[in-house]
Structure formats: structure tokens, C-alpha cells
Image: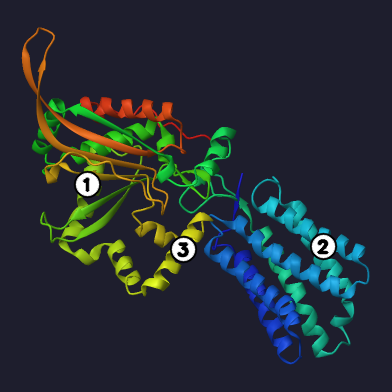
Amino acid sequence: MSYFVSRKSLLVWLSALVMTASAALRIAYSCGKGADAATVWFQIVLPVAACLIFVLMILLGGQERFYRTAIPAFLLAIYYSMRVSAALPGPSLRFVFWVAYLAIAGFYAMTVSGRVRNNWALVLLLAAGIGVLAYTHRSAFSGASWSERVGFLPELLFLTGGLFAVLAMQPHADGKYHPTWGDRVDGRRLRTLDPVQVVANYIMPTRGGSSNFVRDSVEITAMERYIREKRRAGLTSFGITHVFLAAYVRTVAKYPALNRFLSGQQVYSRGEDIQFCMMVKEDMTTEAPESAMKLHLTQTDSVEDIYRKMNEQVTRIKEASDASDFDKTARLLSLIPGVVFKFVVWVLKVMDYFGLLPKFLLEVSPFHGSIFFTSMGSLGIPPIVHHLYDFGNLPVFCAFGCKYRKNEIDLDGNVVQRKYIDFTVNTDERICDGFYFATALKHMKKFLQHPERLDEPLDEVVKDVD
């Protein structure tokens, strides 16, 4: 169960309004008073930042990540604890109040993340807090100076804003999974993995030290026949890459662990989003520039869907080299001086480790995805064994080479000539075990050997574990 708030709700806008008013009044009240640095940071900056962060979260992320409003709730709990600690004499009494305020923030976090199935207890708790605050400052309502009234209002307003937000909470009723604590923008954290697999993620911290590769070949008589049929049907540029990609998508539908990735020593699932990455040359010359391409596919995409999505992207990149978002980002980053750029990359790696990279950077990055394909066939060479990038979270790299003929003896003892292509697959063994990988790759090879099966209706899409 998970909760959300909608920007269409009047209560959400009232919550944002009173939270903003709380921050504004606190600043206005503080401007006319002198204060030391500790007071400024813990009694002014901290609650103002918490209120404004809360407003941003409910307005920008309330639909999918309302649970994150627990972060400003903890900031406000720390603010209250610091404020009470300054007025109380004994350490034991201060400890009690610290525990009490943090416990309230913890209860808020449990409620908004869906672990508490009903929000009425939180409503009563906030309403009681407002009542106690109003009673203890009842003198501010009559006969008090302007300073006393304004000094009381910020406390009342942020509690009221929290109450409005909690009243606006609604449970997701669409039956889909929605993010919660520990999830990333690009994936859902898997929490029921085998303990051995969890430990292995820390023993093998890099993709270079945890990669396995396999080299195989496939006879392509049926594949070439299938490609000719598709071209006659109107898919004029249909080729081996489309067959490989469609086979991989069908394999993920049955073996969803292939669509996992590892980041920050935790394993995540991309769910229905299969992110395919590939480098595209504008022209087949050594001087022609390369651009990164990323496709978003699903397990239910047909061969025609994959062909259409891929060709639209390739055409867009070839027609205008500056159309690639990765090219634009790389061009901007290249302007940073070398020493500073090394620091920038380190910051990006740290942010990625903790799942803090913004979504637009994840979208343009070819180092974040489900699988990277590279075709050596167009270059006339065998497939390379490509490394996995330590930056990012891409767990599978597939390369296939040029066609070649091979003389073989059939069952009747006759020498026959068959056509093959070799391919290599480099995998991050931490996302699933070797037996799973082997089974999935054998399943993928069946589609490569009998590509007509790609046109059969998909029986079932298997969901990954929790």
C-alpha cells in the first residue's frame, strides 16, 4: 500500500500556502532580532528549509513520491528538539523530548510510506499538536504584542500545513507498484534476495571484477529468411540487430532478472522498462562521429514496435548530429577544465551510488540501461568482448560479428555449407546467478534460431521478485 496527494486537491494547495507562509513569517520575525550563528542555523534556516522542501515535495513529487515528505518532517523534529533542549535544564528530560519528537517523525514516515494502513491516527496526532500549541500560546490571541503573535504563528502554520497534507492523502488504487524508501528513480529495490547474493555485492564492488562473458554462434539460415519476409512486408531496413533485440525482449518477458541492475551494492529491477543502448554512426567512415541512442521498450513490444522505435531514433540522430541529448550533455561537460572535471565525475559517481542523480541525466546516459548492443558485422570483423562500465549501472553488453560460412557434415554424411554469426555476451553476475543467466541465454538463442516464434502471441509476462 502507498499514498499519494494530487495537485488537483484544494487541501494540497492550502498545505503549500500555509507552509510557505510559515517560512515567510519566520524570516520576517527574525529580521528585526539579533541572533548568533547557532540560532540562525538551527532556529531559522532549519525550519524554513524544512517548510519549503515540504512544499516542493507535495507539489512536484506528491503523485509518486509523497513518502519523501518524511524528510522535512524529521528536519522539523530536529528543530523542535533543539528548541526544547535550549530551554530544559537536565539532560534526561532533553533526551525524553528528543526521543518523543523523533518518534512522531518516525510515525509520520511509516504512515506516508503505507506501512500504517490508516492515516487517522496521524490526523489526530497533528490535530492534538495544534490544540496543545494553541492552548499553551492562548495569550497570543488576545492582548499580546505584534511580536508575540508573529512569533507563535510559524509553529501553528507548519503543523496546520502538515495536517492539510495528511488529510489530502489517498491510497493508490491502480494495483501497480509505486516507489517507496530505498527505491531509485530508475528502479525498484529488490528486498527478498538470497543473503549470499547480498553479501557478494560487497565482496565484488565493481563490474569489472564481477563480469562473466560467454561466446556463442548461431546458424542464420532461418534468420535471413525471416529478415527477407519482414522486408517484403514493408520493414525495409529490418536486420540482424532487430532480431537480436526482439529476442532479448522476449527473453526478459520470461526471465525478468535480466532487467535488474546493481547500484550502491543493492540490486534493483527496472520492471517493465527495458532500456536498450547503442552507438550510432552518422556515416560508415572512420571520420564520422558517433552518437548514443537509448530506447525504452517493454516486454510486450512486438517486432514491429521495436523496429519502429529503433528506426525513429536512428533516423533522428543521422539527420542531425546535435539531436542526441547525450551529445549535448557531453559537449557541455567537455568545457569543464580537466582537474575540475575529475571532481565532477567523482561527485556524479557518489550521487549515483546513493540514487541521487536527476532523472534527466539518467535518461541521456548510455551507461545507465538494461543492455548495450554493438554490431561488428557492419565493420566486417568478429564480435569483441566488450567490458562493462564501472560508471553507471548497465549490467549486460552484447556484441555480434560478421557472417561467415562453415562446411559441416549433415546426418546423412553429406558435406553442407551453413552460414553463422558469432556473438558475445558480457554480464554482471551480481544481478542473478550463473544458472539463471545460462537458462535465459539458451532461451534467447532459440528465438535466434527460430525467429518466426517472435511473431507468436506472448503467453505471459513474468514479474520479478519483491
The quarter of the picture where the C terminus appears is: top right
Q: Secondary structure at mark 1?
A: helix
Label 3 Cα crowd, 10 Å radius (few <14 / some 14-19 / many 20+): few
Depth check, front residue: 327 or 380: 380
User: Neighbour class for label 2 at 10 Å: few (<14), some, many (≥20)?
Assistant: some
For label 2, the SS is: helix
Kindly identify which numbered label has been placed on residue 308: 1
User: Residue tagged by mark 3?
Assistant: 346
Report, in whole angstroms, how far the alpha carbon at label 3 lies from the one at label 2.
36 Å
Q: Residue type at mark 3: give it.
A: Trp
196 lies left or right of 139 = left
Q: Whole-percent x and y of residue 205? A: 50, 46
Mark 3, secondary structure of its residue: helix
Tag on residue 98?
Answer: 2
Residue 201 image position (x, y, % from top left): 52, 42
Amino acid bearing label 2:
Trp
Q: Nearer the viewer, residue 349 or 90?
A: 349
